Amino acid sequence: MNVEDFVDILGCDFYTGVPDSQLKALCNYLMNTYGIDEKHHLIAANEGNCTALAAGYHLATGNVPVVYMQNSGEGNIINPVASLLNDKVYAIPCIFVIGWRGEPGIHDEPQHIYQGQITCDLLDLMDIENFVIGEDTTVEELKSTMDEYYNILDSGKCVAFVVRKNALTYDEKVVYENDNDMIREEIIEHIVNVTGEDPIVSTTGKASRELFEIRESNNQGHQYDFLTVGSMGHTSSIALGVAINKPDEKIWCIDGDGAALMHMGSLALVGNVNPDNFVHIVINNSAHETVGGMPTVASTMDLVNVAKSCGYSYAVSVDNFDDLDKELELAKSRNELSFIEILSSIGSRKDLGRPTTTAIENKENFMKFLEK
């Protein structure tokens, strides 16, 4: 189905969400049509964030908002849906558009398998009527469903469209880029050159995929790295848990700007604990690159001062490899909680692969390595 038909049938004027590759057609349409526009389209830090934003929009206008997300974000909306939007509380209507990763019977990455199995079950449990859109869904079917949904929305309840792979199409292309020079994969190569056999906890998305392939290229083992293939936004908390319990090890966290923003409160916890064996690296390309390249708000933020305000002992931003190498060496030798923001370009190799070990193998190898 053409995304213009989908948007026209929904008939809504305000969209907010967290980008998803399964919803790339919708995301690109919104960026081409509105860009980032506080009246029509805002990309939020996490799915609970955009659900609450949508509630505020409804309170101010009386209109129905649309919240879009990957199904992995359903967990983040449970609290605002159950305790804010629900018709037994404030009865705030909302349309959710959810990309269905890990759909049963469709091959996908391990972090999506269980979430895919329970996607519609979670919506049912939250009393959200849901309709699955596939490649064969017609405009007439969608219109008929939306006619039924109007009555549900009028009663103060929420509805959802669960979108299968390739169900929505969009012919226009959007190019996402920035003015930064450093390439993320090369950045990670420099990190690996300095960390040696120190443990690394890396964030979900292409950063972990690139780290895995760098180890392969270097003929190194993968036992040094915990690849957080799912659970976006929680990598620094995982790394903190490791750092606290392995005080004699230098623990490196490779994070992304979108992930760091998603649960930014974790920076305050890290800063409060202030482990002197923790190096937190945020590779900032100001984009949700893994799911298409849509922007984050990190381009307008001072992440260094955020980290300092949260209690990080040392924080710095770099935009070139000479400064990066210097700061990595200093962080390795420094007995202080350190934060390094690295300004990166958008983009990756077209032939970038995925880890060939399973998530369980990754966990077990990493734990055995930490036992040494």
Image (cartoon, grey):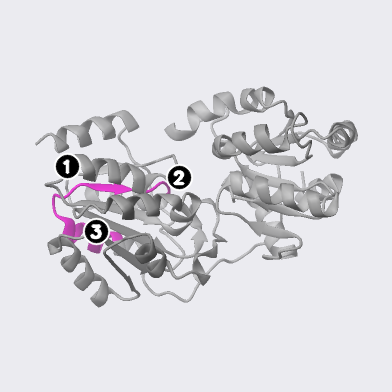
Residue annotated with mark 3:
337
Residue annotated with mark 1:
246
Dividing the picture into quarters, in which one does residue 350 lie? bottom left
State which tag comes first along the sequence, 2 or 1.
2
Residue in the image at 44% along x and 70% along y: 302
Pointer 2 with pointer 1, Cβ within 8 A: no
Dividing the picture into quarters, in which one does residue 35 lie? bottom right
Q: Nearer the viewer, mark 2 or mark 1?
A: 1
Q: Residues within 10 Å of mark 3 (few under 14, many from 20)?
A: many
Task: Give the structural element (helix, strand or loop) at label 3.
Answer: loop
Calculate the distance from the C-alpha at mark 2 to the C-alpha at mark 1: 23 Å
Residue closer to the observer: 131 or 304: 304
Three-letter code, disc 1? Lys
Magenta-drawn segment: 188-205
Percent x, y of residue 10: 83, 45
Image quadrant where one finds the N terminus: top right
Residue closer to the observer: 180 or 371: 371
State which tag comes first along the sequence, 3 or 2.
2
Calculate the distance from the C-alpha at mark 3 to the C-alpha at mark 2: 22 Å
Residue closer to the observer: 8 or 370: 370
Q: Nearer the viewer, mark 3 or mark 2?
A: 3
Three-letter code, disc 2? Met
Task: Give the structural element (helix, strand or loop) at label 1.
Answer: loop
Percent x, y of residue 336: 20, 60
Residue annotated with mark 2:
232
